Image (cartoon, helix red, strand yellow):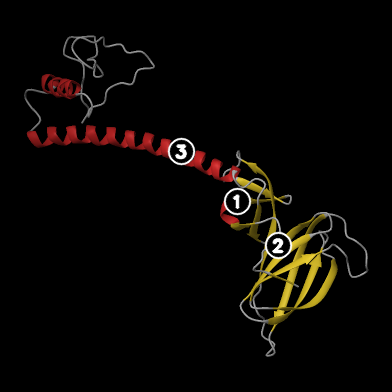
Amino acid sequence: MTINATPPNSNTAFPLSTSGPGNSPTKSLGTAKPGLADNFETFLSLLTTQLRNQNPLDPLNVNQFTQQLVQFAQVEQQLRGNKLLTTLVDTQKTVQSTQALAFVGTTAVVDGSAATLTKGSAIWTLQTPKKVGAVVSVTNAAGQTIFSSNRTLAAGANSFAWDGRGDDGRTAPDGIYKLTVTAKERSDETVPISTEVQGTVDSVDLTASPILLSIGGQRYTMDKIKRVVQPSSDETSRRL
């Protein structure tokens, strides 16, 4: 039901946002208006205005009137909840930005098969559930295989460092290269091998949503980072 907040024979709207009898109805833009739950006098003003302007031949019963007042309070609570959620989101963004900036300059490990060859060094970490023989191949951006080798992988984490030399003995230029690992057991069943990329976090893009970290020229979200290690190779990994 729509409430008429203007008394009969009056051209002036009833001031619903006054904070007290001695205050001016007009508030500055920088002053927050009191809400229904904050100002009991505002609540009483709504109550008396409703009673004064209802139809005397068909007045509201107590239940209807109470329901309307409850609806007023619920709407206000919802609006306040929305403002609090907005504040919470802004705070969370600030926290994420601080966390992302802390990664700059660190050596991070992320899931992936593409690593950046820089100054004759590209490092991958291979995860295997058991000891197995595997074929390790490195391809360039054009999809050409420039290096391939048979290796034995121990169960767990294995660090594979490539110096950029191809099968033809030439040194490949710096850039992004992809590692492919094919492993089979004696029963000729394929063994799943997961690959991880290790690199230095060069920069952080705080304008992106979600925030992106640049690792070796490639961009990753923070949830892709599995761990942060020292600049040297992980001591728990085994070099091939």
- Mark identifier at residue 91: 3
Between the residue at mark 2 and the residue at mark 1, the CA separation in whole angstroms equals 23 Å
Q: Is residue 13 left or right of residue 219?
A: left
Residue 2 at what x, y percent from top left?
A: 22, 28
Residue 166 at what x, y percent from top left?
A: 88, 67
Q: Between 48 and 58, which is closer to the camera in this rendering?
A: 48
Which residue is drawn at the image coordinates 64% and 52% (left, top)?
A: 220
Residue 240 falls in which quadrant of the image?
A: bottom right
The crowding category of the residue bearing disc 1, from other C-alpha atoms within 10 Å (few below 14, some 14 to 19, many at least 20), is: some
- Viewer-nearest of discs 2 and 1: 2
Q: Tell me which amino acid carries mark 2.
A: Ser
Q: In this view, does 111 lie to the left or right of 99?
A: right
Q: Which of marks 2 and 1 is nearer the N terminus?
A: 1
Q: In this view, does 23 lie to the left or right of 201?
A: left
Residue occupied by mark 1: 221
Q: In this view, does 35 lie above or below 102?
A: above
Q: Earlier in the sequence, mark 2 or mark 3?
A: 3
Which residue is drawn at the image coordinates 70% and 62% (left, top)?
A: 233
Residue 142 falls in which quadrant of the image?
A: bottom right
**Considering the image in quadrants, where does the N terminus appear?**
top left
Between the residue at mark 3 and the residue at mark 1, the CA separation in whole angstroms equals 19 Å
Q: Between 230 and 64, which is closer to the camera in this rendering?
A: 230
Secondary element at image label 2: loop
Residue 197 at what x, y percent from top left?
A: 69, 60
Secondary element at image label 3: helix
Residue occupied by mark 2: 233
The crowding category of the residue bearing disc 3, from other C-alpha atoms within 10 Å (few below 14, some 14 to 19, many at least 20), is: few
Q: Tell me which amino acid carries mark 1.
A: Thr
Q: Earlier in the sequence, mark 3 or mark 1?
A: 3
